[in-house]
Amino acid sequence: MIETDLLINALLIAFVVWFAYRRFAPVKGIKTMTTSELKSELKKSGKQFIDVRMPHEFQANRIDGFKSIPLYELKKRAGELSKDNEVFVICQSGMRSSKASKVLKKLGFKHITNIKGGMSAWY
């Protein structure tokens, strides 16, 4: 009985570690950038900037040059973006933009940058 309990506990711990790694580990092909680094990128041409927050969040506080494409609409609106140009993705904290970056990667985008810390780090 004790051996079974140890095995179950070990499996649960292994699952939690695996889940946390999959959730937070960087994805190959997706870069991260700070908001300070982003400021210089905003001045360059040929770049695409998307904000994946909810529309009311975007309306209340946004960065000039960013287009609002909420995370829940990203798959159906991805055609509005060019797969040839780099896409910079931001949200409030970096969590939704991380998810959005993974969605774009699965859709075949090759040049994706997630903005670390999101709008919370912008100010």
Image (cartoon, rainbow, N blue to C red):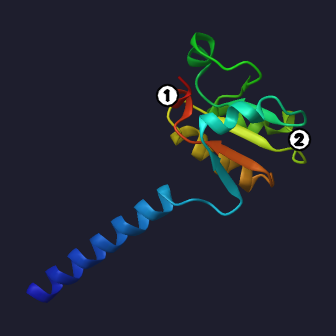
Q: Amino acid at mark 1?
A: Ser
Q: Position of residue 74 (x, y in %)?
A: 71, 36
Label 2 crowd bin: few (<14), some (14–19), many (20+), radius 10 Å: few
Which of the image's four quarters has the N terminus? bottom left
Q: Position of residue 101 (x, y in %)?
A: 66, 47
Q: Say the numbered circle drawn on residue 2.
A: none
- Are the two marked residues, 2 and 1, in contact with CB atoms closer than 8 angstroms? no
Q: Earlier in the sequence, mark 2 or mark 1?
A: 2
**On screen, residue 92 above or below 6:** above
Label 1 crowd bin: few (<14), some (14–19), many (20+), radius 10 Å: few
Quarter where residue 73 is shown: top right
Quarter where residue 55 is shown: top right
Residue at image position (77%, 30%) is 42
**On screen, residue 103 above or below 59:** below
Of all residues, the one furthest to the left in this rendering is: 2
Q: Say the numbered circle drawn on residue 82.
A: 2
For label 1, the residue is 120
- Nearer to the camera, 113 or 96: 113
Residue at image position (74%, 48%) is 112
Q: Is residue 97 visible?
A: yes
- Of helix, strand and loop, which one carries label 1? helix
Q: Amino acid at mark 2?
A: Ser
Q: Is residue 1 visible?
A: no
Residue at image position (52%, 60%) is 25
- Of helix, strand and loop, which one carries label 2? loop
The answer for how far apart the CA atoms under marks 2 and 1 are is: 27 Å
Q: For this view, does 65 lie left or right of residue 117?
A: right
Q: How many marks?
A: 2
**On screen, residue 28 above or below 101:** below
- Nearer to the camera, 20 or 26: 26
Residue at image position (51%, 31%) is 121
